[in-house]
Image: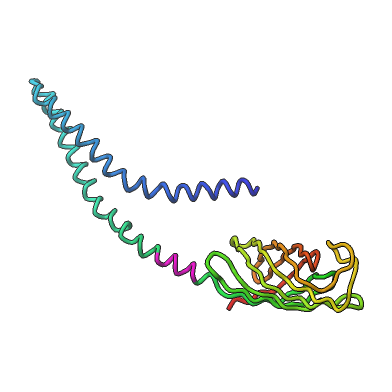
């Protein structure tokens, strides 16, 4: 079903692109073709002696000239859409700029092998978002201060990102999902990937200091 939908969508896009181009070139091509036929008929008329055939050729030429005149009337009307294209492009750019707000989110999840409560703040910088995270994970007889900076590339819903984080463990811990041995406070790097469903953002990833990560957040656009 998804493949059928994508094929239909592709067909609509191709038609929307090709149809205006075809409409713009058709009258000019038709006029050129009819003018060539008129020239050819005029040569034939000059060589024809039969009154009946001459009358038939002259009628055909008159009909072609009438069609040419009608098609030529359509040409000025087609120039209007081309003049409007720059205005439409400017509106599109304004919409794209407006569609890149700052993001503040409240989230909960997993970090450092404990339950995380945190906030995110990100702002658009060129093709990506830059921002930071601050929160606290509550585990079994320990806690983790979580802080970091991140860069996120948004693909219109799905997104991926890179983070540099600090995990401030209240004590040395073991059995952190994704990490082995004894874990102490320090700096790590991580990868995240997720998607946005309305105001809800869901992501998962891995961090060299916080281990396996998973978050569900509520976004507010500023």
The reply to whether the magenta stretch includes residue 95 is yes
Q: Is residue 74 above or below residue 108?
A: above
Q: To which quarter of the image does residue 197 belong?
A: bottom right
Q: Specify the segment rendered in magenta.
A: 90-97
Q: Is residue 139 above or below residue 211?
A: below
Q: Is residue 38 above or below residue 115?
A: above
- The foreground one among 36 and 62 is 36
Q: Magenta region's main secondary structure?
A: helix
Q: Position of residue 141 (x, y in %)?
A: 92, 78
The residue at the point 75 percent across, 67 percent down is: 188
Q: Is residue 185 left or right of residue 2?
A: right
- The foreground one among 168 and 95 is 168
The residue at the point 60 percent across, 63 percent down is: 154
Q: To which quarter of the image does residue 209 belong?
A: bottom right
Q: Is residue 50 left or right of residue 122?
A: left
The residue at the point 20 percent across, 32 percent down is: 37
The reply to whether the magenta stretch includes residue 51 is no
């Amino acid at each position: 079903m998804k493949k059928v939908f994508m094929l239909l969508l592709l067909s609509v896009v191709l038609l929307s692109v090709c149809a205006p181009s075809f409409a713009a070139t058709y009258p000019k091509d038709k006029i050129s073709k009819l003018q060539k036929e008129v020239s050819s008929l005029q040569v034939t008329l000059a060589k024809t002696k039969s009154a009946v055939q001459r009358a038939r050729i002259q009628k055909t030429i008159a009909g072609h000239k009438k069609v040419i005149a009608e098609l030529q009337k359509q040409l000025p009307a087609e120039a209007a859409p081309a003049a409007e294209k720059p205005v439409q492009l400017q509106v599109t750019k304004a919409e794209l700029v407006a569609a890149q707000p700052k993001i503040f989110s409240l989230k909960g999840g997993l970090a450092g092998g404990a339950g995380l409560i945190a906030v995110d703040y990100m702002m658009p910088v060129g093709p990506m978002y830059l921002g930071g995270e601050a929160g606290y994970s509550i585990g079994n007889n320990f806690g983790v201060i979580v802080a970091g900076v991140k860069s996120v590339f948004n693909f219109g819903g799905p997104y991926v990102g890179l983070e540099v984080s600090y995990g401030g463990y209240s004590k040395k811990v073991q059995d952190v999902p994704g990490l082995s041995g004894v874990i102490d406070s320090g700096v790590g790097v991580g990868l995240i990937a997720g998607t946005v469903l309305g105001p809800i953002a869901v992501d998962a990833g891995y961090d060299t200091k916080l281990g396996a990560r998973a978050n569900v957040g509520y976004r507010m656009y500023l």
